[in-house]
Image: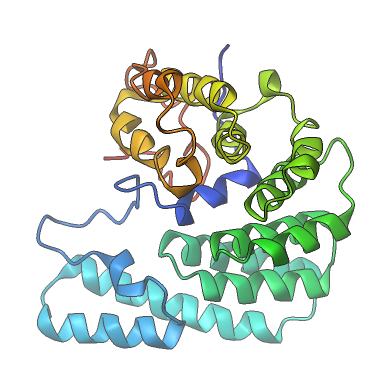
């Protein structure tokens, strides 16, 4: 099955679920600071203070100067966004802010954006974005309640997958399975499979989790294999990790070479169109 390079809304979840080493896209030099580390978990003001302190230590670092300007630009953008009451204009600005906050693991700031957009336009797309961020902040019950209140239709794939994940994390496996069944394994796209594998593992379904993991690793670029293997061994996968079939799936070799066609990062905030190393 050939996977084309497209955008998928579910993919934003990948960043905060901590795939180490995958395309931050900053283009830093070997000795440059880790910009995401400077911002992780911080507010805009806290991040600005951390970056300014780093600039005092590295005043000649061109990449850091560039990032500082980007941070200030997004700070001004956030101020304008807070005052914007036109849903269409807010959506455009909010999209840019959300991408920046997710790239730099500033999830509290991303949540502010999501809440404002949902307030201005409480449609299913904005609800899914907010629920996604809540899941990334480990607020699983709140995410589940929001997603169920949206009453997603069969065709709302992102909402159904995230509802299944939220319900699985809160221990409601039976209802989680009902939502997962709305997105058949055979039709899953790369980013959807990333979530599907996680849900299957939380259901203690080692065979289905293994099938999803094997398919992802087989179709993703070879350079992503190590990071993806780490992703598939975090706490959500603890019950299936001892399974022999699951361990075998983790060793699946890529058949994609350096092609990005099946990369779970393709079209997401993690992809800058270049190398992901």
**Which quadrant does the C terminus fall into?**
top left
Mark count: 0
Of residues 60 and 33, which is closer to you in this image? Answer: 33
Q: Please tell me in which quadrant of the rendered image residue 190 appears.
A: top right
Q: Is residue 24 left or right of residue 3?
A: left
**Which quadrant does the N terminus fall into?**
top right
Residue 152, above or below 6: below
Q: Is residue 53 left or right of residue 126?
A: left
Q: Please tell me in which quadrant of the rendered image residue 221 appears.
A: top left
Of residues 45 and 150, which is closer to you in this image? Answer: 150
Residue 185 position in % (x across, y down)? 67, 23
Q: Please tell me in which quadrant of the rendered image residue 97 appears.
A: bottom right
Residue drawn at the location 51% of the way across and 69% of the way down: 107
Residue 171, above or below 177: below
Residue 122 position in % (x across, y down)? 84, 66
Of residues 171 and 82, which is closer to you in this image? Answer: 171
Q: Is residue 116 left or right of residue 69?
A: right
Residue 88 position in % (x across, y down)? 78, 66
Colouring of the image: rainbow
Residue 202, above or below 15: above
Residue drawn at the location 52% of the way across and 45% of the way down: 268
Residue drawn at the location 32% of the way across and 39% of the way down: 276
Residue drawn at the location 61% of the way across and 59% of the way down: 135
Q: Is residue 15 left or right of residue 122?
A: left
Residue 51 position in % (x across, y down)? 27, 80
């Amino acid at each position: 099955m050939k996977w084309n390079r497209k955008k998928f809304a579910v993919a934003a979840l990948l960043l905060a679920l901590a795939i180490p080493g995958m395309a931050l896209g900053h283009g830093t030099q070997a000795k440059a600071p880790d910009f995401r580390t400077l911002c992780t978990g911080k507010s805009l003001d806290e991040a600005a203070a951390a970056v300014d302190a780093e600039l005092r230590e590295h005043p000649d670092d061109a990449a850091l100067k560039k990032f500082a300007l980007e941070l200030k630009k997004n700070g001004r953008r956030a101020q304008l966004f807070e005052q914007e009451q036109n849903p269409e204009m807010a959506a455009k600005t909010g999209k840019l802010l959300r991408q920046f906050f997710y790239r730099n693991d500033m999830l509290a700031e991303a949540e502010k954006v999501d809440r404002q957009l949902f307030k201005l336009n409480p449609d299913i797309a904005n609800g899914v974005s907010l629920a996604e961020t809540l899941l990334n902040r480990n607020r699983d019950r709140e995410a589940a309640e929001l997603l169920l209140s949206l009453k997603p239709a069969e065709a709302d794939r992102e909402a159904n997958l995230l509802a299944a994940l939220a319900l699985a994390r809160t221990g409601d496996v039976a209802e989680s399975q009902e939502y997962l069944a709305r997105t058949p394994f055979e039709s899953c796209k790369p980013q959807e499979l990333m979530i599907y594998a996680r849900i299957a593992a939380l259901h203690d379904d080692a065979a289905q989790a293994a099938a999803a993991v094997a398919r992802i690793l087989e179709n993703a670029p070879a350079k992503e294999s190590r990071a993806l293997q780490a992703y598939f061994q975090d706490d959500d996968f603890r019950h299936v990790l001892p399974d022999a079939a699951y361990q075998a799936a983790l060793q699946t070799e890529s058949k994609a070479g350096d092609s990005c066609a099946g990369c779970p990062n393709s079209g997401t905030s993690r992809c800058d169109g270049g190398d992901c190393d």
